[in-house]
Amino acid sequence: DEVTSGHRVLPEIIFIKPPIQTLHVPVFDNDAHQKLYSSFSPKLGPNPKKRIGIYASADINVLHFPADNFFSAGEQVTFSAQDLPALGYGGGISLGWFGRRLGFETGIQYSHKSFKPGRQLLIGESLENSKVDFQAVQIDLVTIPLTLTYHVKHTGNLRVYTLAGVGFNLIAQANYDLNIENNYPLPLSITQSASALAANREAHRIREHILDGATFTSKTHVTAFVGIGLENYITPVLSLFVQPSYSHQVPLNGFSTNNGKNFKNLNIRIGARTTIQ
């Protein structure tokens, strides 16, 4: 304590008012969310992004079989034209460049398709003949697609786009399955044996492949396709997509004719893409 002129002087006490604290409640900032995705989103990103993908596919196919004429026992047998439906499956890998609005994608795809023509031909006379049943056609197809995409809408991490392009298709292998039932008069003792009955029925597979020497144009065709895609980004570099499309074979002069056969296809791809640059 201090004493001045006989009076006690108390030390000065200063009260400091604490500052008022403001409580900040987290609020979803859509603009910040969009800026985050602008670093990799094809719609918002300023530079094209290089992306690779992998996918599985399922399809509904229609193979147009042209009319065919055969001669049996001196008579002409005509098979009318057919549209053969079939289910198929496959998969592939893709490489694409996606910008703000437009994108380009290519890659390689494998697909397997099996058709059942159901055509039967009787060869020989009335008493001695063979019934040939054209039972199935199995095709292994390799396709290189060239696809242009156009971004339609972007909401959050969800992207909607349309697509169109052409596909160059090579029939890597084709199997033609034939069942033959022979009808020849045989002695009763022979016809009762199991080996003779088995010999009367034959199964044959005619196999064609890319190295069998057939002309290249007989194993290739071009398709044009259109579709739509839905892509969802689950991380800044990884997305999942669903992509249905319709394709139709384009006949060209001296190319892409398949001896009159024609393919139509409704395809759906399910896969993933990731940004690599």
Image (cartoon, grey):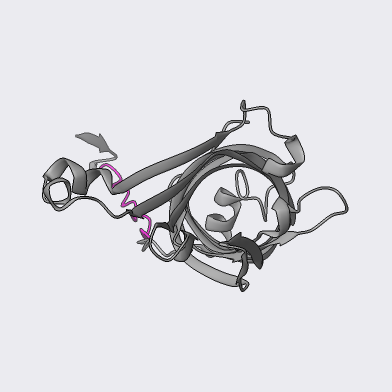
First to last magenta residue range: 10-22
The answer to whether residue 49 is visible is: yes
Q: From this viewpoint, which residue is outermost toward the right?
A: 253
On screen, residue 25 versus residue 265, left or right, reads: left
Residue 153: image location, x then y, percent: 63, 68
Q: Is residue 139 above or below residue 50?
A: below
Residue 207: image location, x then y, percent: 50, 37
Q: Nearer the viewer, residue 47 or 92?
A: 92
Q: Residue at x 66, y 59 (%)?
A: 261
Q: Quadrant of residue 217?
A: top right
On screen, residue 163 versus residue 53, left or right, reads: right
Q: Nearer the viewer, residue 201 or 28?
A: 201
Q: Residue at x 72, y 53 (%)?
A: 259
Residue 24: image location, x then y, percent: 38, 61
Q: Is residue 205 above or below residue 252?
A: above
- Image quarter where the N terminus lies is top left
On screen, residue 274 versus residue 223, left or right, reads: left
- Image quarter where the C terminus lies is top right
Characterize the magenta stretch by its predominant secondary structure. loop
Residue 100: image location, x then y, percent: 73, 53
138 is within the stretch colored magenta: no
